[in-house]
């Protein structure tokens, strides 16, 4: 009896040690890798409708609406393809923006723009990714993701709900911030808040996830759930402008064909993007 | 042979259309048929645009553009096809008439995985040049461009059938136009031009009339593009069988005509050193003057363009191109001239586009420039546009034509230099 009690106690102790080891074994790189996966790479493909409401300091409101298709090109959370069909405002309606994203830092993304009024397929120079996306407070890099390889990562705090990770760019001259702090949900690894800092630890821009929904999908015939940020807000703290992004009709693993991300579908959008 | 091939293509297009259009004979099926359409998307705009010449032109009005324009854009789709209509009507102060232009009226279907079909009035564009067209022989409207209409109007529509065939090896686009669609070239109606025969400028007092080939299925055009992408470098081969797109010859009695033209070319476009590079060439075979010794018909040409575009700073894009037109059989051309100013063997043109976006990309400052060191002429097109709201756009700009000689391509329009402004409300 005594032996059994000792055995159970030892077992419990061992288990606790293992658990402690496991949580301390969560290195900052592992956290960042999982956060990157959750933010950008869930499922083989995904699609949905995006509505961005841009509100400037004076309270003027502008609305951008588009549908977006995304497909991973590999299983290693690296290359991806994006297809964006604009629906609002009127002057950009039916315009298509397509990106073949290359995770390799030495390789620029390939980008195309289709202008329906002229039936023109334009190739766009891989510009500064820190440029505003459609005039909103979100940047291109916020939409298609900043590669974890671009930054040094440091776990500066572990809170009850969040891992707090400081990210410092490897090439500071290529970006407008000195560092940014990400608050990553400990349960699902979704980055819930990012604060960008200029010199002198001045926060000047932030992105916050306001709502995360569990999206049901199937993978290899099995039901899966993908926690997805459906409402987020980007704020420019210098000029008080903000953009609210709502992601609706989200679906994963619907079998988006690789062929969609080609000139043929730039000129005539696929039904997946139209509905 | 060529004719037969063109007709085959057209018949193929029609057959495909008939094969995929479901027949709805019975009346009670009509409602179900209508229910299969997505709700009609209705859009459009109303626009006021006014502009004037900055100098006196004895052959034209002071106003260069003055119009109130209404555009309607209707679109719907079903499981098997898409339908689009886009048309403009406007009151035109230059022609002093009500005008209309159906820009698009087409049906599109993707009946098989490997096939796209688009039939009807449509705007068509291909090739790699930035506002320079080599293998794109679809109709242009330089007149609208030069008087400061929206750049959308640079492309005039075609009445055509476009068939796209897609596979792993090479994609094929075939465009068959059963009745020749010419460019909307400068006639003197809106812009004065250099009339070589009269050795003088001409305008509304001498509207250029040309004898346009217009027999259905005989005076037709066929354009083909074969293309594929290798490591995201876009490669294409082109062919065109039709006519010079603006009057490029005359009859012995002096009537302007559109002689036959075949064009063969190739292009490549892709990433180069942090930007996008493009190269394109085209051989213009002036089939009605293959030896180049007919003074009444334009000679064959080679056309080349090499270009590069990249971002210089945040929201500042620049594009630079070098474009050359080489007149072939130049010796024969020189011998056949009788007193009128000779064209240079090589026409060199440098183009530059700069675009700066400001105020959350609602304000766009742009400059398009064409400069020809050989013709010693230039065309500059500065423009400012501002999105006051999501639906109201304000725009102002200018078209500057500068040239030493009266007969060069841009120089002849010197008296047409104009400034304009517009307001557009989109729905």
Image (spheres, rainbow, N blue to C red):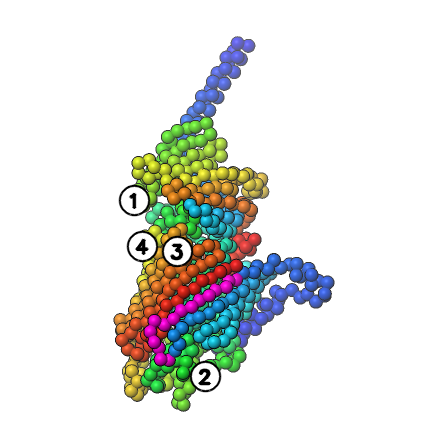
**Residue at mark 4 shares a chain with residue at mark 3:** yes
> Mark 3 against mark 1, which lies toward the viewer?
3
State the separation of the CA atoms marked 1 and 4: 15 Å
Q: Does residue A123 appear left or right of residue B338 in this picture?
A: right
State the separation of the CA atoms marked 3 and 1: 27 Å
Q: Tell me residue B134's x, y (percent).
A: 38, 70
Q: Nearer the viewer, residue B141 or A272?
A: B141
Query: Mark 3 = which residue?
Result: B363
Q: Nearer the viewer, residue B426 or A192?
A: B426
Q: Tell me residue A4's x, y (percent).
A: 53, 13
Asked whether residue A56 is in view, the answer is no
**Residue at mark 3 shares a chain with residue at mark 2:** yes
Asked whether residue A8 is in view, the answer is yes
Secondary structure under badge 3?
Answer: strand
* On screen, residue A226 above or below B143: above
Question: Which residue is at 49% across, 38% downward?
Answer: A210
Q: Tell me residue B378's x, y (percent).
A: 30, 70
Find out whether residue A208 is within the magenta segment.
no
Sooner in the amino-acid sequence: mark 4 or mark 2: 2
- Numbered badge on residue A173: 1
Query: Mark 4 = which residue?
Result: B312
Bin the neighbour count of mark 2 within 10 Å (Cα to Cα): few under 14, some 14-19, many 20 and up.
Answer: few
Magenta residues span B44-59
């Amino acid at each position: 009896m005594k032996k059994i009690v000792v055995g159970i106690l030892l077992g419990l102790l061992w288990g606790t040690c293992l658990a402690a080891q496991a949580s301390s074994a969560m290195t900052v790189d592992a956290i960042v890798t999982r956060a990157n996966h959750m933010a950008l790479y869930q499922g083989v493909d995904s699609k949905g409708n995006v509505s961005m409401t841009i509100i400037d300091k004076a309270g003027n409101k502008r609305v951008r609406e588009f549908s977006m298709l995304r497909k991973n090109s590999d299983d290693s959370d690296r290359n991806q393809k994006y297809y964006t069909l604009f629906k609002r405002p009127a002057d950009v309606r039916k315009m298509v923006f397509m990106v073949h994203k290359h995770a390799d830092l030495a390789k620029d993304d390939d980008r195309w723009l289709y202008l329906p009024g002229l039936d023109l397929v334009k190739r766009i120079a891989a510009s500064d990714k820190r440029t505003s996306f459609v005039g909103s407070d979100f940047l291109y890099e916020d939409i298609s993701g900043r590669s974890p390889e671009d930054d040094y990562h440091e776990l500066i705090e572990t809170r009850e709900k969040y891992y707090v990770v400081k990210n410092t760019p490897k090439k500071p001259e290529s970006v407008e911030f000195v560092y940014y702090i990400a608050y990553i949900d400990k349960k699902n690894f979704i980055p819930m808040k990012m604060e960008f800092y200029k010199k002198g630890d001045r926060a000047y821009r932030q992105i916050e996830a306001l709502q995360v929904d569990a999206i049901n999908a199937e993978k290899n015939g099995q039901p899966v759930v993908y926690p997805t940020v459906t409402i987020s807000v980007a704020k420019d703290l210098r000029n008080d402008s903000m953009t609210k992004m709502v992601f609706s009709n989200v679906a994963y693993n619907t079998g988006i064909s690789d062929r969609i991300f080609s000139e043929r579908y730039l000129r005539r959008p696929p039904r997946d993007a139209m509905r | 042979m060529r004719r037969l091939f063109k007709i085959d293509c057209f018949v193929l297009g029609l057959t495909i259309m008939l094969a995929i259009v479901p027949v709805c004979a019975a009346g009670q099926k009509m409602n179900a048929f209508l229910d299969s359409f997505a709700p009609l998307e209705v859009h459009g705009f109303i626009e006021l645009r006014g502009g004037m010449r900055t100098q006196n032109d004895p052959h034209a009005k002071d106003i260069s553009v003055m119009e109130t324009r209404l555009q309607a854009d209707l679109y719907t789709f079903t499981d098997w096809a898409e339908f689009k209509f886009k048309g403009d009507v406007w009151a035109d102060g230059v022609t002093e008439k009500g005008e209309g232009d159906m820009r698009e009226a087409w049906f599109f279907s993707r009946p098989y995985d490997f096939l796209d079909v688009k039939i009807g009035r449509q705007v068509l564009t291909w090739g790699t040049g930035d506002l320079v067209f080599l293998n794109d022989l679809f109709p242009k409207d330089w007149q609208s461009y030069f008087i400061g209409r929206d750049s959308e109007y640079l492309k005039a529509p075609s009445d055509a059938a476009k068939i796209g065939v897609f596979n792993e090896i090479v994609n094929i686009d075939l465009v068959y136009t059963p009745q020749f669609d010419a460019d909307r070239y400068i006639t003197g109606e809106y812009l004065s031009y250099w009339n070589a025969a009269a050795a003088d400028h001409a305008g509304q007092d001498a509207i250029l009339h040309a004898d346009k080939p217009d027999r259905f299925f005989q005076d037709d055009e066929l354009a083909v593009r074969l293309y594929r992408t290798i490591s995201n470098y876009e490669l294409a081969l082109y062919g065109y069988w039709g006519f010079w797109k603006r009057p490029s010859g005359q009859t012995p009695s002096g009537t302007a005509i559109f002689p036959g033209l075949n064009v063969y070319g190739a292009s490549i476009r892709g990433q180069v050193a942090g930007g996008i590079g493009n190269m394109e060439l085209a051989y213009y075979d002036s089939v009605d003057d293959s030896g180049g010794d007919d003074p009444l018909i334009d000679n064959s040409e080679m056309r080349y363009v090499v270009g590069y575009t990249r971002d210089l700073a945040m929201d500042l894009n620049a594009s630079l191109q070098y474009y050359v037109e080489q007149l072939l059989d130049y010796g024969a051309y020189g011998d056949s001239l009788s007193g009128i100013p000779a064209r240079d063997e090589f026409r060199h043109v440098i183009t530059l586009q700069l675009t700066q976006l400001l105020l959350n990309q609602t304000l766009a400052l742009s400059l398009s420039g064409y400069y020809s060191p050989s013709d010693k002429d230039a065309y500059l097109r500065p423009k400012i546009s501002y999105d006051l709201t999501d639906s109201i756009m304000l725009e102002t700009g200018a078209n500057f034509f500068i040239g030493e000689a009266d007969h060069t391509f841009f120089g002849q329009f010197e008296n047409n230099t104009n400034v304009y402004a517009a307001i557009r409300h989109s729905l």
